[in-house]
């Protein structure tokens, strides 16, 4: 027989509900440096060392490899098993937080939580997208070029996803074009299509399409 659960008041339930919401918000990549690291991958190990000291600590890095990180060439990434394997802890965490971002991107969900608790709930997906875009633009030597790359896409591309011939970017950014493109692709902001087209093109990623308004606001700054 299941032990009888003690009855709680409505206010006590709301308190526990608020604790749950706060816990979920706290693991979003915009608010937690561990999940932020997972959502920045794959990245070059040398670049990650500038953000996370532990990438120079081989002992700790090996422990994290046991939990689901791996080195492929110069890059660090999350292992992606072909079948469900709970030994890959970090892969599971990444999947969990991905679902979480989708939940908090839903207006109905956020409004429902607000009605119960009387507090504004952030759109965690939009918040993370805005943060990683700012990470790109704050890059010391290339930030201005990254901003100009996106401005050219907006000016010369189509309305839907700013799709534009890559040669339009190269005309202005010259030899920096490929480096900037690769950064934006790694951060999931831009897609680069070269094999399926008669000429290479760049366009906003599906995620970036959802938050074009965020990009436009930041480009005005």
Image (cartoon, rainbow, N blue to C red):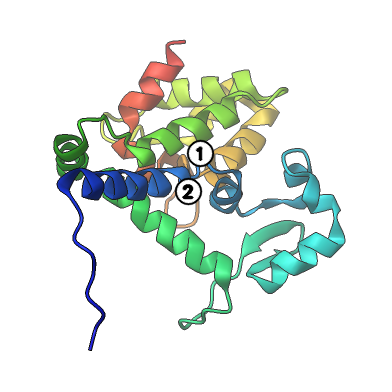
Residue at mark 1:
31
- Furthest-top residue in view? 221
**Label 1 close to label 2 by CB (< 8 Å):** yes
Residue at 46% across, 22% down = 152
Q: Secondary structure at mark 1?
A: loop
Q: Secondary structure at mark 2?
A: loop
181 over 154 or under it: above or below: below
Residue 81: % across, % down: 53, 78
Q: Position of residue 64 (x, y in %)?
A: 70, 65
Front-most of residues 192 and 214: 214
With respect to residue 78, does 181 lie above or below?
above
> Is residue 101 or residue 42 the one in the foreground?
101
Q: Tag on residue 120? A: none
Foreground residue among 177 and 86 = 86
Q: Position of residue 114 (x, y in %)?
A: 19, 35
Crowdedness near tag 1: few (<14), some (14–19) or many (≥20) residues, C-alpha within 10 Å: some
Q: On the image, which quarter does residue 201 sit in?
A: top left
Against 105, residue 213 (above or below) is: above
| Mark 2 lies on residue | 27
Residue 154, quarter of the rendered image = top left
Residue under the point 37% across and 20% down: 216
Left-right relation of 210 to 164:
left
Residue 102 appears in the picture as rendered: yes
Q: Measure how far apart labels 1 and 2 are at the Cα level.
A: 6 Å
């Amino acid at each position: 027989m299941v032990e009888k659960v003690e009855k709680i008041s409505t206010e006590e339930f709301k308190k526990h509900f608020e604790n749950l919401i706060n816990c979920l918000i706290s693991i979003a990549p915009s608010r937690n440096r561990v999940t932020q690291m997972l959502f920045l991958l794959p990245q070059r190990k040398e670049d990650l060392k500038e953000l996370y000291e532990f990438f120079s600590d081989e002992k700790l890095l090996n422990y994290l490899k046991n939990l689901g990180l791996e080195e492929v060439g110069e890059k660090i990434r999350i292992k992606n098993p072909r079948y469900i394997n709970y030994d890959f802890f970090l892969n599971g965490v990444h999947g969990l937080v991905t679902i979480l971002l989708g939940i908090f991107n839903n207006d109905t969900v956020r409004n429902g939580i607000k009605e119960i608790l009387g507090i504004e709930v952030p759109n965690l997906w939009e918040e993370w997208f805005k943060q990683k875009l700012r990470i790109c633009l704050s890059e010391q030597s290339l930030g201005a070029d990254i901003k100009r790359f996106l401005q050219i896409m907006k000016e010369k591309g189509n309305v839907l996803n700013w799709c534009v011939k890559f040669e339009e970017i190269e005309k202005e950014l010259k030899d920096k074009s490929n480096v900037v493109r690769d950064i934006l692709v790694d951060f999931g902001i831009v897609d680069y299509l070269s094999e399926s087209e008669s000429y290479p093109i760049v366009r906003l990623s599906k995620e970036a399409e959802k938050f074009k308004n965020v990009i436009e606001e930041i480009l005005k700054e």
